[in-house]
Each structure stands twice: as C-alpha cells, then as structure tokens.
Amino acid sequence: MAAIQSVMQETRVIAPPQGMVEGAAVSGMPAYQALVAEAERDFEGFWARLAREHLEWKKPFTKVLDSSAAPFFKWFEDGKLNASYNCLDRQVAAGLGDKVAIRFESDDGQVTPVTYKALLARVCRLANALKAMGIKAGDRVIIYMPMTVEGVMAMQACARIGATHSVVFGGFSAKSLHERIIDAGAVAILTADEQMRGGKALPIKSIVDEALAMGGCEAVRNVVVYRRTAGAVAMTAGRDQWLHDLEAGQADTCEPEWVSAEHPLFILYTSGSTGRPKGIQHSTGGYLLWALLTMKWTFDIKPGDVFWCTADIGWVTGHSYVAYGPLAAGATEIVFEGVPTYPNAGRFWDMIARHKCSIFYTAPTAIRSLIKACDVDPAAHPKKRDLSSLRILGSVGEPINPEAWMWYHDNVGGGRCPIVDTFWQTETGGHMITPLPGATPLVPGSCTLPLPGIFAAIVDETGHDVENGNGGILVVKKPWPSMLRTIWGDPERYRKTYFPAELGGNLYLAGDGAVRDRVSGYFTIMGRIDDVLNVSGHRLGTMEIESALVANSRLVAEAAVVGRPDDMTGEAVVAFVVLKGKRPEGEDAKAMARELRDWVGREIGPIAKPKEIRFGDNLPKTRSGKIMRRLLRTIARGEEITQDVSTLENPAILEQLKRAI
Ligand code: WT7
C-alpha cells in the first residue's frame, strides 16, 4: 500500500474496513490474487467452475469456450438454461418466495413491495400472454417503458419465453425509437400510457404511435400498454392491448423456454463513432453468469442486504444491476421511478434512510449535482439523514473526480463505506475493472484492478504493451463470458470496431484511454479516444448529433460536434453550425440556437441537446475539405490555438468561431 501511495498523484489510500474483509465474498487481497492466479493457470477451468457453481443449468454444458470463429466467441454453447428461471423460480425453490424481490418507490413516494413469488406469477402471466400472441423464442420485442416493476417484468417475461428484448430508454424520441424498431426487426412493443418524472406525467404511448406511423414497422403486430397514470391515450383496435387485461386472462405458471447459453437474451443500442447506433447483442448464459457473479464479488451481496442501483432499465446498468443481477442473487432491491431532485435534492438520501438501503450504486454526475444542490438547499444534505444502514457505495458510467469521490465517501458513506468505482461498458455486460469492497485498497479516482478472469491491459497504437506509468489504449486480451457477441445484423462492424486489424485483430478495443500506476498497477480511465462523448454518464456519438443537425435541411448547411469538459456533466456537447441563410447574431443567434437545440431533442432525445451552439460562415477545413475537429475542440474549450493552422483552407474562420453567443 505504501508503494501505491508513493507514486500516485493521489496520495490518499483507503484500506478496506476490517469488518468488511471478514466474510466478504472475496476476502482480502490474497483471496483476490488467488482467483486471478486460478484464471491465469486454467482459463477455461476457471470459467467452467464458476458457471457450474453459480448458475442452474437445465442441461450442463460440455464445452466451455469455442474460439474457432474468433472474434465471434461462444461460451457454454451446448448448455441449456433460462435467465428468468435463474432469477425467479430458483429463489422460490430455495424458500425465498416470500422475500421481497423489489421494493418499488413511485415518483410520488408510494412504496409497493413485490415478493419473489408474486413477481414470478406476474412474469408467468405476461409470458403466457406473449406466447398467446404468437411471440416465440428468437423474436425481438421492444420495451419502451418507465422505471417500474412492470418494466422489469417485461424483460423477465421475454427472457422466460426466449424472446430477445431490446429496451429503449424512455427519454429517446419517436425517431430514435423508430430506428431501433426497424433495426431490431421487432414484432411487438411493450410500453405504458405515460411516465411519471418529477411530479409530471410525460407521454410514452403516443411516442410509440408516432414511431409506428413513420412506416416500415408492419412486423409489429402487438402493442402492450401498462396503465401507469390512466391518462388519456389512443388504443388501436386489433393491435393495442392493456397489460392488466392480458394478465387477467392467463395462468400464473409458465414453463420456461430452455435455450442455449448462446441464445441472444437482449440487444441494447448504444452510440458509436458513426451516425448509426449499434445494437449490442448479449448472450444468455455468459451474460447472466457475470451479472450474478459481480453482484457477489463487487457488491458482496448478502441475504440481508437492501440493494439500490439508480440506473434506468434503458441503460446497460439497469439491465445487469436492476433487471437481472440482483434477482439472480436473490436480493431485495429498490426500484425507483423518479428523479433525484424531486420533491427535493434530498430524495436519494431520504430513500436510503427509509428503506435501510445497504448497497447504493449511482453515477458521478448525480453525485456532483447533489453536492451542488446542498449549497442551495442545506436541508438536502445527506448528513441530515440517518444513513447508517449503508455498507458499500458504487460509482459507474464516467470517471469520478477525486473531490466528488471524497464527498461521497465522507458525507454519504460516513467515512466507513468502500466505494467501488466500476469501469465497464454496454459491450462488456458487467464490471471489468473495479475495487472489491473486502479486498482492494482504494485510491480516489482510480477503478483499481481488473476482476479475476479479465485480462485488461494498456497498449500503444500498434497493439504492443506500454509500460506502467505511460498512457495508452485500454484493451482486453482474452474473451470473457459476458462480452457482446456481435452487433445485431452487422458482424463486420463488430469485428472492425472491437477487434481492429491495427492492433493485431485479437485484442478487444474498449475505446477508452487509460494509464496504470507505475508501482501498484492500478488503472485510471482517461476517457474515450473515439468520437463518443459521455454527457452525464450518457453515451452520445458526435456523428449522431451532427446527422441530426444536418437532417434539418431547411436551416442547416453543415455541422460539426465536439465535446468539452464540464464540471457538472463530465462532458458537454458543443455544436458548430453553418446555416443555409445568413449567419445570425445577437438575439437572432440565441433564438436560432434554441430552435436547433429543440430540433436535436426531437431527433434523438433531450439528452443529446447541445449545451452550446456557435454559428460560422464556414467550418475550419483542410484544403482537401476535411473538417479539423481538433481545432474545434480547442475553440470549444476556450483555449489558445497552438496547433499549426497553415494547412487550413480558411484560417480567418477561427476568429469568428471563437466568439460565443
Ligand atoms: C463508457 C461506457 C458502464 C455502464 C454505464 C455506461 C465510461 C463507464 C466508468 C468508470 C471511467 C467509465 C467509459 C466507457 N465509463 N464507467 N467507472 N470510470 N469511465 O455504459 O454507455 O456503454 O459507456 O463509459 O468511457 O467506455 P456505456
């Protein structure tokens, strides 16, 4: 530990609390190192042991890993299982039927506990209803639902019958939804009448109607609507049905569909460096194994814990650590419909106190905004609540700055709770690099060490290892069970994006830059190295936003989008726009910027709205016509341009773009 201390800029090192080490799933650094060594010594044997010990198989697998078509890896392929069975039936069979699986808290604070037995019965009813509609294993079903018990049920019901779900975050626009319906080739959509957020009812069903009206969705034969608010919605006869009507007509048992471990459990769309989102396809067996195992290793989940992951089911965190992991672990979890600032910025802390939450998992952006909220409203401070139930804190989605880390540690965790800063991605299915609460000494701002079995490394542009202390490209050298299997419908893009030839074709490219500490080997993530932005923990492609802007062919001639560091949101979107008409100034520019921001909100969703838009008569381009984004990034940051601009076609444009509205 002294070694870690001596070299890192960050000098604070926090040892795991003694009480946490004893009885932890991974108890102490020697236990961690033993698992790492086991995976190194006998890679396949290691994963086979874990898959046999932690999952229940209908038919055991005989082969662990098939690399014959690498990088299209197959894990446990001839084994058969069902994800919903492993999450629900298994708990009921183990005598946990009356244990609360989900403690749901609505936006307005009503609490509804749902036991494992009750959840299983409702999942079975819905699964039977889906089957009665003719939906079968392998069919794709879109889930466009708010954070509710019914949202989790929808995912579990699909898993039960082997239908591959694709959850679309409720904040995405009709156009984004439409794009995903078409790409996935969906046959049904599960949705709600409206969603409640911060005291307001927002539309959902009407957005589904709008998306379906955009055309090309003839394959969608059924729309199931959960009545959340009883607000007025249009129901299309022969296509739309109420969830409660369907449930009422079905039996509360349903034989699970036993699928191959490689059967696609879900597709989840995420942003990449081109305009088109990628459908990340995950497996059943390998994915579930890791969702469950990381619940045990990273969160040290115990029977008495109350687990709360604040992520929406529309993101991968809400898949692995709301819909699957906690249930597979037989835990009690909180599912929260609302937002952290309603009715006030003390909501998270109030809920932790009321529900006696013991493991809390959220995003740095939420922490930073709640820190700031305390300045405005001292009553919202976590120290004003009894948070003594907490034992472990987690962070996910973006780098956590050491100041926010310390605040979280001291004020929320009372200085007693380890923080697991979990680095992972939609593509990785579960945690990759993270501290273990009963083992790893913590360094604020570092995600520390890879989990056992995960061969993370840092390489240069040619795929060669760099020495610790030098920054480079984060890669994973061996496959792991919960890795993505392909990009839905585009295997070539999968290969090119994640196993690029430049790195030798056999390293998984995460897309992040990172550095390892010279002595401890601890990883620190430096952020994306591609055209992907991380705004409030949401992943956005710059090309996607550019495409959305130029899709406004009436107004926009050209657009370039870059990121800029932001204290609150991590990164902020800055757009440089050339209009078809005259370049606006003053109030006109403000009004135009507002119009274009709203346009992007409608094209993609409110999360993609640029924080700032600047107008120019042109964009800085090389003589061959390439936009120099590097320069735009410098301008967006408000920094002096030190780059060579002699190759620019039009250097005068820089002065114009430097002026913010
Ligand atoms: C990207 C993946 C992981 C689920 C939520 C986001 C960034 C994620 C961390 C962390 C630093 C992080 C990376 C990564 N990221 N976790 N603990 N420290 N950066 O999933 O939308 O697929 O985004 O989020 O840049 O590549 P995602």
Image (tube, rainbow, N blue to C red):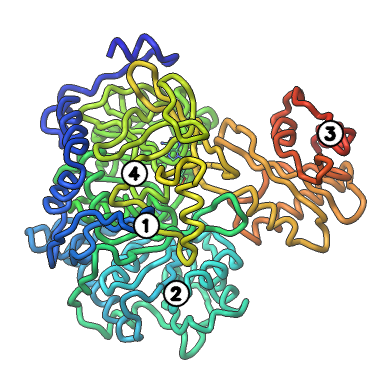
Please, what secondary structure does the residue beneath circle 1 have? loop
Quadrant for ligand 1 reads: top left
Percent coordinates x, y for residue 188 in the rendering: 43, 78
In this rendering, the label closer to the viewer, 3 or 1:
1
Residue neighbourhood size for the residue with mark 2, other residues' Cα within 10 Å, grouped as few (<14), some (14–19), many (≥20): many
Query: Which kind of residue does numbered mark 4 sit on?
Result: Met
Q: Which mark is residue 351?
A: 4
Q: Which residue is mark 2?
A: 189
For the residues marked 3 and 4, what is the alpha-carbon distance in whole angstroms? 50 Å
Residue neighbourhood size for the residue with mark 3, other residues' Cα within 10 Å, grouped as few (<14), some (14–19), many (≥20): some
Q: Which residue is mark 3?
A: 654
Residue 102, visible in the rendered structure? no
In this rendering, the label closer to the viewer, 2 or 4:
2
Query: Which kind of residue does numbered mark 3 sit on?
Result: Leu
| Horizontal arrangement in the rendering, residue 189 relative to residue 282 (left or right) | right
For the residues marked 3 and 1, what is the alpha-carbon distance in whole angstroms? 46 Å
Query: Which kind of residue does numbered mark 1 sit on?
Result: Phe
Q: Residue at x 85, y 43 (%)?
A: 616
For residue 66, what is the image quadrant? Answer: bottom left
In this rendering, the label closer to the viewer, 3 or 4:
3
The quadrant in which the C terminus is found is top right
In this rendering, the label closer to the viewer, 2 or 3:
3
Query: Which kind of residue does numbered mark 2 sit on?
Result: Ile
Q: Which residue is mark 1?
A: 72
